[in-house]
């Protein structure tokens, strides 16, 4: 009985240590640059300058369908699946644009890379592209993301933008900041491009 209890405590201890290590490693990941322009109680407005993205397109219509498939393909690219066989640092967040036509997932490339100096993906379905500068409205939530939680926060953000008479442009998108094996301290965001130049 004592041995079983000891083994349980050891396993629990190793689990806690591993989660602390994962959380610390995630917190050190480079973040996509942005500037906070305006803050409200429920959301904030940010300006994102141009970034270089590696993107895959899918017929997936749910977070779960796109998440595992897209992450695997893009991870293969940055972990050596490219013409130079080099590892490219993982950054945060991962972008997901989920809709009923063509959904996309994108990894943001480190700031030292652009379309001209990134190695070519071995997988021809991965496209290297440059994002446009944009103002976005952002709402965050914790825990593990799901279709239900994403749509809940889309509704919350949409309602608050209408209250503030802020015009949204295009699809609402999801940003994920944590690997799937990180259980605590998770951060998720829903964003949408907004017409802020008139403010």
Image: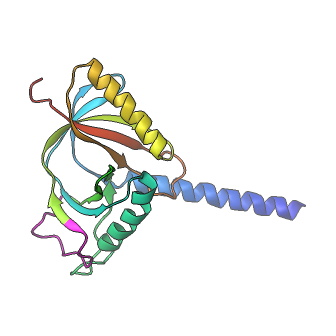
Q: Which residue is drawn at 36% across and 41% down?
A: 189
In the image: residue 110, left or right of residue 184: left
* Residue 165 point in image, percent of width and height: 22, 20
> Which span of residues is magenta-colored?
111-127
Relative vertical location of residue 40 with respect to residue 186 in this rendering, above or below:
above
Q: Which residue is drawn at 12% across and 48% down?
A: 132
Q: In which quadrant is the N terminus drawn? A: bottom right
* Display colour scheme: rainbow
Residue at the outermost right position: 1
In the image: residue 153, left or right of residue 8: left
Task: Looking at the picture, tell me which residue is in the foreground, 70 or 140.
Answer: 70
For the stretch drawn in magenta, what is the main secondary structure? loop
In the image: residue 19, left or right of residue 37: right
* Residue 114 point in image, percent of width and height: 13, 63
Check residue 15 for magenta coloring.
no
* Residue 184 point in image, percent of width and height: 53, 47
Relative vertical location of residue 134 with respect to residue 80 in this rendering, above or below:
above
Residue at the outermost front position: 101
Q: Tell me if residue 181 can be seen.
A: yes
Q: In which quadrant is the C terminus drawn? A: top left
In the image: residue 19, left or right of residue 190: right
Q: Residue at x 25, y 69 (%)?
A: 126
Q: Tell me if residue 112 can be seen.
A: no
Q: How many marks?
A: 0
Task: Looking at the picture, tell me which residue is in the foreground, 132 or 26.
Answer: 132
Task: Looking at the picture, tell me which residue is in the foreground, 70 or 188.
Answer: 70
């Amino acid at each position: 009985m004592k041995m079983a209890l000891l083994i349980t405590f050891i396993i629990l201890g190793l689990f806690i240590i591993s989660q602390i290590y994962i959380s610390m490693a995630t917190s050190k990941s480079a973040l996509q640059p942005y500037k906070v322009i305006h803050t409200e109680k429920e959301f904030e407005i940010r300006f994102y300058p141009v970034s270089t993205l590696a993107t895959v397109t899918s017929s997936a219509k749910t977070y779960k369908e796109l998440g595992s498939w897209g992450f695997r393909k893009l991870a293969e690219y940055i972990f050596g699946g490219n013409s130079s066989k080099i590892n490219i640092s993982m950054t945060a967040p991962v972008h997901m644009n989920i809709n009923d036509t063509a959904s996309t997932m994108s990894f943001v490339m480190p700031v030292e890379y652009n379309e001209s100096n990134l190695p070519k993906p071995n997988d021809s379905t991965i496209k290297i592209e440059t994002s446009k500068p944009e103002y976005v409205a952002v709402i965050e939530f914790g825990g593990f993301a799901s279709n239900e939680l994403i749509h809940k926060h889309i509704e919350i953000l949409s309602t608050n933008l209408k209250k503030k008479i802020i015009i949204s442009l295009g699809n609402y998108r999801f940003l994920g900041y944590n690997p799937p094996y990180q259980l605590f301290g998770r951060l998720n965001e829903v964003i949408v491009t907004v017409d802020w130049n008139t403010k």
